[in-house]
Image: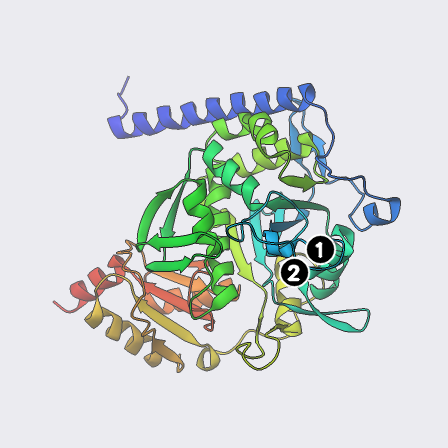
Amino acid sequence: MQQQPRSQSSKRKLYLGLTSIGIISLIGGAIIANLLPNTPLLKQELSATDAAAFRQDESFSRNILQVPIISKPVNILLLGIKTNLSDIKNSDGKARKKTGYDAEINTLDGLSDTMMLLRFDPSTNKVIVFGIPRDTKVEVNGKSEKINAIDHEGGIAEAAKVVSNTLNGVQIDRYIRLNNFGLEKIIDALNGLDVTVPKDIKYQDDSQHFYVNLKAGKQHFDGHKLLNFLRYRHDANGDVGRMQRQQMVMRSMLAQWSDPSTVSKIPQLMSIVKDSVDTNLTVEEMVAIGGFTFNNGTDKDRIQTLLMPGDYNGDGKHGVSYWLPDSTGIGNMMAKYFDRGEVQSPIKSAKNIYIRVQDTGYYPDATKRLIAKLRKAGYENVQLDKDPKVIKENLETTQIIAQKGELGTSQDVANSLGVGKAEISTTGNLYSDITIKVGQDWAQFQQHNNK
């Protein structure tokens, strides 16, 4: 009998090992779902009217092994709540007096600093993370509001309705409200999280005891450091820049579920965060989500991040600063990624696509040739991203990021170059259609062709 090459044998053993661990983990998830009370972690019961704001038909079921699974696409509204002492009012309507400094408190009675719509779709095996800027302008009862105030003022059902109306009528199935204390505890329970800091960050706010001093590059964060990274918003893109970082962390957190031990930690996580979370997800549904994200969890392409199309109406120095939604762009994203409606406008032609190129690996000559090649191929609006703080990631593969969700357009650019990988993400230049992060493959390709 012919002996297998060692590398193939090792890969086969690794695959079988991971598969076995995965099966054990999922069976363990089924046991957990059966042993624990299958009730939501609701802070207060939803009225019949409020409950009706969330889809009632069943998106969850059990397979032949009685393991909880996601059987239909499910959309979950995630709200991250931050509340300081100064945000809490006394009976006379005045803010409570600060004691020493404006400390954060463990409550869900605050504004939504983070808003995302998560979609877990078994038909495509994808997870969509759709970011909603907290300053998004919405109309409620004829009055202009920022979307982050809706939950605080009108409740979670009202927030779900407003989000649905803003996003072309997309259905909201479940919700999760989580404050910073809960997030910090979750990260610590998961033994931290690996995150790539996009640029040096240094900030100090003595009034809140909020201090950030981070260097660009890949780092392992505990809960406290991660929270400071997520809270920071004092760069050129303000809250939208913070949203980009939040989505990057969410992507890393979802990928963390590829560790089989994570599903088994659900009871521990529930015990830790029960006073910091409010959700209409049941334990069984949480196990189903854990199992879904575990399945092929190492494939990063499964997790796609999108940002609500729009732009700021100003800098906030002259009147209220809003993020103004682009209804056409939103309609296109809902049609493509949430099965809601139809695409409203055709994909841009090559000459109208705005491309920013980032030299992330010290390849100035190769980067110039890349821009020249794209212009020769008909892409007229190609520019070098001159931000001096673009992180030097030294990527092996050139990333061609569909900043606005047009994966086909990104793939066309990759085909024109002959190298690189098209992907959907919001980690590129905010105002581009496509952001290209130059990697080693393009530099080597150019060296080979210029010999």
Quarter occupied by residue 400: bottom left
Q: Residues within 10 Å of mark 1 (few under 14, many from 20)?
A: some
**Measured along the vertical axis of the image, is residue 124 above or below residue 235?**
above
Instruction: Tell me the amino acid under the disc marked 2.
Output: Asn
**Measured along the vertical axis of the image, is residue 240 above or below residue 84?**
below
* Between 367 and 186, the one nearer to me in the picture: 186
The residue at the point 82 percent across, 69 percent down is 141
SS class of the residue under badge 1?
Answer: helix
Q: Which mark is residue 148?
A: 2
Identify the residue under disc 1. Answer: 152
* Between 40 and 320, the one nearer to me in the picture: 320
Give left or right: position of 333 versus 230: right
**In front: label 1 or label 2:** 1
> How was the colour assigned to the protein in this rendering?
rainbow
Instruction: Tell me the amino acid under the disc marked 1.
Output: His
Q: Position of residue 167 (x, y in %)?
A: 69, 63
